[in-house]
Image (cartoon, rainbow, N blue to C red):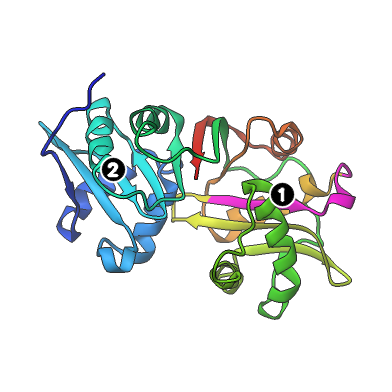
Amino acid sequence: MGLLRTGSVRLLEVGDAAAAWQILSADPVGNLFVAARLHANGFEHWRLGAQLWGYYGEDGLESLCYHGANLVPVCATPAALEAFAVRARDERRICSSIVGREEFVGPLWQMLSDVWSPPREVRTGQPLLVTSTPPAVPPDPAVRRVRSAEVDTLMPACIAMYTEEVGVSPLGHDRGAGYRARVTELVAAGHSVARIDDGEVLFKAEIGAATNQACQVQGVWVTPRMRGRGLGTAGMAAVVSEALRSVAPVVSLYVNAHNTAARRAYERVGFTPAGTFMSVLF
């Protein structure tokens, strides 16, 4: 199918906020990343650190696309996806990933794959999971919020998790300064939780994107020597308990389809399917 040139995509401004929020609220879990960014930073591009594109159909604003370190299509109709692809093809790729619901990311990537550089990996069929009830298994009482003074203790576990999950080290040209700043920010916000025994991180996770409707758990990791002992299940139960108590009424996450051990643990905790995500990693 040929790409359609269209004038219906434009950069959204503060005046578009009401219409944009109406779209985002239609899927508070699937749209969580973009909603959380806008909640925290507003619509001004210089504060958001990204652009928010809007596709206008006959009835007004109907689809969004976040264009920054991630490219994230939101509630995108087929016509909107074609228009977003045209816009993205005309600009230099700045994103390190395309991520979102698979029904939007798949077609968008298909329209970009012939002009953008080959990705490191394409992950399809990533289960999106949610829970809004107390965990079905006992939480690990040793899992707690990480203290500000423990960032140096936490960092090796964060680096190991990122490298294992993404396939590259987070210690880039800045020698990890940016990644450390993000870890520190999550700790300061009380969104980093871990089990730390005698100075060793045995389990850790973060509550990343969050709004008053939902939050997303990320960075779940168990030290390799302790895997297969139920530490991840009990740890996730503790994370869910804390997130439901202090962050949002719905807890979500998405996981790689092949990670059957993690998926079993999440099912035991009480997570249920809410669709599929897809990630294109550059």
What label sits on residue 215 in the rendered view? Answer: none
Location of residue 192 with respect to 225 vertically, above or below: below
Image mark count:
2
Looking at the rendered structure, the kind of residue marked 1 is Met
Extent of the magenta region: 216-229
Q: Residue furthest bottom?
A: 149
Location of residue 87 with respect to 48 vertically, above or below: above
Residue 143: x and y in percent read 77, 61
Identify the residue position indicated by label 2 in the image: 88
Q: Tell whether 52 sits left or right of 72.
A: left
Residue 146 visible within the image: yes
Identify the residue at image location x=72%, y=68%.
154
Which of the two discs, 1 and 2, sits closer to the camera? Answer: 2
**SS class, disc 2:** helix
What label sits on residue 236 in the rendered view? Answer: 1
Residue 185: x and y in percent read 55, 71
Identify which residue, 136 or 257, lies in the foreground.
257
User: In 3D space, how far apart are the residues under numbered discs 1 and 2 (Cα atoms)?
Assistant: 37 Å
**SS class, disc 1:** helix
Looking at the rendered structure, the kind of residue marked 2 is Ala
For the N terminus, the quadrant is: top left
